[in-house]
Image (spheres, rainbow, N blue to C red):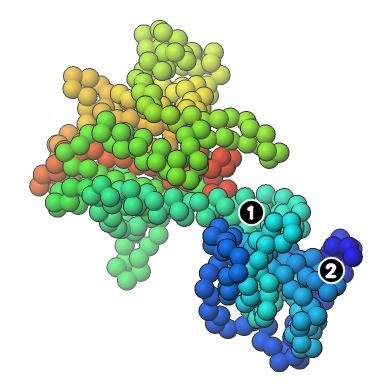
Amino acid sequence: MPVMSADATPQTHSTEAELIAIRREKLAKLRELGIDPYGARYSVDTTPGELRANFSEGRRVKIAGRITALRDMGKSVFFQLGDVLGSIQGYLGTKNLGENEAAAWKCLDRGDWIGIEGETFVTKTGEPTVKVESFTVLSKSLRPMPDKFHGLADRETKYRKRHLDLMGNPGSANIFVTRSLMLAEIRKFLQDRGFLEVETPMLQDVAGGAAARPFETHHNALGMPLTLRIAPELFLKRLLVGGYTKIFELNRNFRNEGISRRHNPEFTMLEAYWAFSDFEEMANLVEEMTCHLAEKFCGGLKIEHKDEDGNVTRTIDLTRPWRRANYHDLIKLAAGDDFFELSPAGRRLRCEELGVQISPEMEDYEVVQQVFEKKVEEHTFDPCFVTRVASELIPLAKLTPGGKTVEVYELIINGQEISPGYSELNDPDVQRQRLEHQAGGEEEQKVDYDFIETLEHGMPPAGGIGIGIDRLVMMLTGAPTIRDVVLFPLLKRRE
């Protein structure tokens, strides 16, 4: 017999409304048979993915999952039962069913959740399978799944209706499972090295730790304005003052800025601080951790990025040791050896020659940074620690002895910053001067003077890092956009 969908009418010849109507008839039939279409507690002894990964014949199992594929051959039915962690084939001989069971089975479709009990075997074609002895309806799906051959192709629908993307695109499901496992491994990696995980406020009186526009809100009971945090840095440093020496926080930050392929208004950030360390030791830590994740989850240190047709567009090589290069040297390679000998006006003219867009209100250091971002960062794909960055860019890092740069690295991979790391500034007087300069005359609104007072109690020298987890996952999984690694990215409301 031809392979058919479990729906009564082939989906290609029916509207969604017609398919929903058919499924509602099946829902009513299940209830007529005395079967609860939405089930109850169902105890399992394994999962479809685990069973397949550790398969052995003759094993009695009890598992549950969604029917993702179905081949009804009359007296025999083969189907796939699974979840985001994997699937296993089921086999049902309809001649062995009682009248009530047979009627119930005819009410099932792709998308329904069921539990099955039976014994494992291998088919003649070598497929691990469960021979079903009994089944239980757990949830009747009233809307059809995405097409089983083409998945969910429309990108906007993927992001707005992630549940459909997870059902129809195994690749997407795998990315998000891998992300979860990576987060757990990051925590373990740091905890194994003596770091303690902490939590700091997401609602803050003064948004600090980065130069970014915050989301603003208001606390009614206290009658005071608050912001969602743009970074946890200043609170984590308070903990260093308090006596913690190895800490990390893995949580959300919020920035009221643009949305792009690499930016989402809320994003996941790892920040870690290590007393008595510096930016170079933190760079070693990030390099070791990233390579550990690649070897554990990506099968090695060569990460392939592919287009939608599966063609390799780029291979990122994480082989250690990673390159380390001076910020100014990289800019001179891209913009000319004489770039820093030019006047500020001359640098603006050079930007025009290079096709780098700048605005009249930019200060000279911002013009230089724009050249770096457009001509260096966006063209750097294999790992590179960019060091000795201009002091104006990072007011929370220590100055390089005798220079105008700071003890910082910016880790660039895949054309974007993945992680900054500092030798943290712990001189309260210098910190006050630099934060007030950054505030540009709005000190009362922007400078966290309580943090300055905290530093006056003494913060040990320390190294600190931030890692953009979304970008890290993008790089390691080959995802082309941040929306492919954030389960529910922010989208403009449909009119």
Name the residue at the left extreme: 457
Report the Cα–Cα distance between label 2 and label 1.
Answer: 26 Å
Q: Residue at x 79, y 78 (%)?
A: 94
Which amino acid does the dot numbered 1 rest on? Pro
Within the image, what quadrant is residue 366 found in? Answer: top left
Secondary element type, mark 2: loop
Which residue in the structure is indicated by mark 2?
73
Vertical placement of residue 359 versus 289, above or below? above
Q: Position of residue 36 (x, y in %)?
A: 66, 87
State which tag comes first along the sequence, 2 or 1: 2
322 with respect to 93 (left or right): left
Whether residue 491 can be seen here: no
Which residue in the structure is indicated by mark 1?
170
Vertical placement of residue 233 versus 133, above or below? above
Q: Quadrant of the C terminus?
A: bottom right
Whether residue 191 can be seen here: yes
